[in-house]
Amino acid sequence: MNAPSVAPLFCVRCGQAPPVQGAVCAPCYLATHTPARVPAIVRLEVCAHCGARHRRGSWGGPLASLRPAIEDEVRQAVEVAPDVGSWAFRLEGGEHDPTNFEYDVVVTGKAGHVPFETRTPIVVHIQRSTCTRCGRRAGGYYESILQLRAQGRTLAPEEVERCGVVIDRVLAQLHASGDLDSFLVKGETVKGGFDFYLGTVHAGRSIGRALQHEAGAVLRETASLVGRSKDGIDLYRVTISVKLPHARVGGFVGVGDVLHQVLAMGPRDAKLLDLGSHRRVTVPRATLDDEPALDPGAARDAVVVSESAGELQLLDPDTLRTVDVVKPAGFAAGGPGVRVVRWSDRLWLLPTG
């Protein structure tokens, strides 16, 4: 019959008491055991143009700071022994030059029942390259063209500027949602309007829908085959026609024999101000396509000569003759001048204030 084993009272390596891991004391265990290994150098690949990080075969988003990416790269590089449970590390040091950071990696934890702390020097080398997105931008790559036009009239410069604001906002929303491949490549004036070249079809469609909702634009989409991928998939380039309404927001449109100011345009309805009564009305957007329209610049200043309960006597801004204009209910000039629009051989008053 075998005698029961008895745990040693002294470390079998140095003879000191007590053993804490197997038959050895803590110092001897750590002297013969490596709880954590750290390589001498790790590399972090970063786009030189936008600051995106390359990891596991793909590019992420631009880094706000290198430090979290450096810590993550070092964490992935640390190798701990199988008997190490929970562990942590910290970096002591900093930038040596723009492409090299020198640190001491201090790893702490427990190997078995033995607490440990190791300190290992490491160099983090920043490898600058060009990410896929920046490479596409530099090469003029685009997947969709947004063609901005106006129905039956010349596109106004401020409408192009407004479209640019919408593009910036929509692209910012797409980037915030993780779609970093959507970007504006370029914009250029062309005969009849303005063209925007975009990195993805999704970007072109998203901007088109925004302009349809906010400006009442009519959308039409066509696609053309431009090649084939390495996997044999057909590649298409999409053209999105965005046609703004004949009547501009802030401008004027005649409905029947009454002039209206255009307050807002949606995909289905238009909100107007009846300049005969100064009441707001809503009409189907399509009904305005064939109506006569005036630009916002048609509004003029007119001097008030006199005012009665139902009329204003104005100095006509074109003929400089006095003319009587009927006031809408509740209208008051409130000063020496008013804004008017000439249409159908009469002057129409715009609301004051």
Image (cartoon, helix red, strand yellow):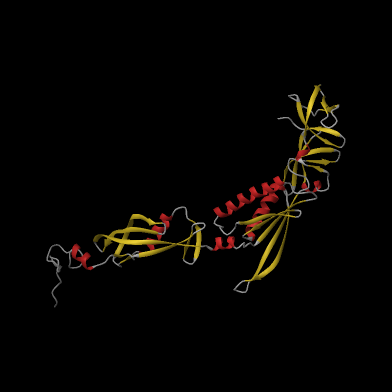
Residue 9 or 28: which is nearer the viewer?
28
* Residue 272 appears in view: no
The x, y position of residue 43, in whole percent, is: 41, 64
Based on the displayed image, in which of its 4 quarters is residue 35 positioned?
bottom left
Determine whether, in the image, residue 302 is placed left or right of residue 18: right
- Front-lying residue, 8 or 94: 94
**Of 256 and 318, the residue lying toward us:** 318
Q: Residue furthest right?
A: 345
Does 301 sit left or right of 2 as displayed? right
82 horizontally vs 170: left or right: left
Q: Is residue 99 above or below residue 293?
A: below
User: Residue 15 sits in which quadrant?
Assistant: bottom left
Which residue is rendered at x = 26% and y = 66% of the image?
Answer: 34
Q: Quadrant of the N terminus?
A: bottom left
The quarter of the image holding the C terminus is top right
Q: Position of residue 190 (x, y in %)?
A: 73, 55
| Depicted 173 relative to depicted 250: above or below | below
Return the residue found at the far bottom.
1
Image point 29% across, 61% down: which residue? 120
Residue 343: x, y in percent? 84, 37
Residue 64 appearing in the image: yes
User: As displayed, is residue 285 above or below residue 307?
Assistant: below
Q: Residue at x 73, y 51 (%)?
A: 217
| Residue at (75, 31) in percent of width and height | 351
Indicate left or right for 194 with 82 as reference: right
